[in-house]
Amino acid sequence: MKVNVIGAEMDKREIDAYVSRAYQVYPNKTIEEMTLTVDGDFVDIEYKFAPKNFDRIRRITGYLVGTLDRFNNAKRAEVDERVKHGV
């Protein structure tokens, strides 16, 4: 993770404390970059998170699905025969 410090000098121990806290607050996110802006006694923290992949979910033949791998042959035929709008 890249850490930027703006407005003052900050020792490694203090930076490490902010990084450790960031991992506690956002355990399920990947932090690419963190900017610490020092203004007197206050520190503003800005995070840049890595983009997260997501699966597309569609409503097909009455079911919410991401992929068709669990559909049987009849359901796959319904998907192939349906009229697609707005494509």
Image (cartoon, rainbow, N blue to C red):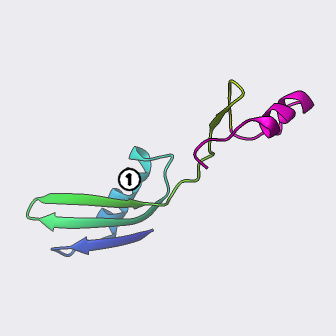
Q: Is residue 57 left or right of residue 76?
A: left
Residue at the top extreme, as displayed: 62
- Whether residue 72 is in magenta: the answer is yes
Q: Residue at x 80, y 36 (%)?
A: 81
Q: Residue at x 25, y 65 (%)?
A: 36
Q: Residue at x 33, y 58 (%)?
A: 18
**71 and 82: which is toward the camera:** 82
Quarter of the image where one finds residue 52? bottom right
Q: Is residue 9 above or below residue 58?
A: below
Q: Is residue 86 above or below residue 20?
A: above
- Please give the range of residues in magenta: 66-87
Q: Position of residue 69 (x, y in %)?
A: 83, 39
**58 and 78: which is toward the camera:** 78
**76 and 43: which is toward the camera:** 76
Give neighbour class at mark 1: few <14, some 14-19, many 20+ (Cα, 10 Å). some
**Circle 1: element type:** helix
Identify which amino acid the numbered label 1 is placed on. Answer: Ala
Residue at the left extreme, as displayed: 40
Q: Position of residue 79 (x, y in %)?
A: 78, 36
Q: Is residue 7 visible?
A: yes
Q: Position of residue 57 (x, y in %)?
A: 62, 39
Q: Residue at x 89, y 28 (%)?
A: 74
- Whether residue 5 is in magenta: the answer is no
Q: Which residue is mark 1?
A: 22
The quadrant of the image that shows the N terminus is: bottom left
Q: Position of residue 26 (x, y in %)?
A: 43, 47
**82 and 23: which is toward the camera:** 82
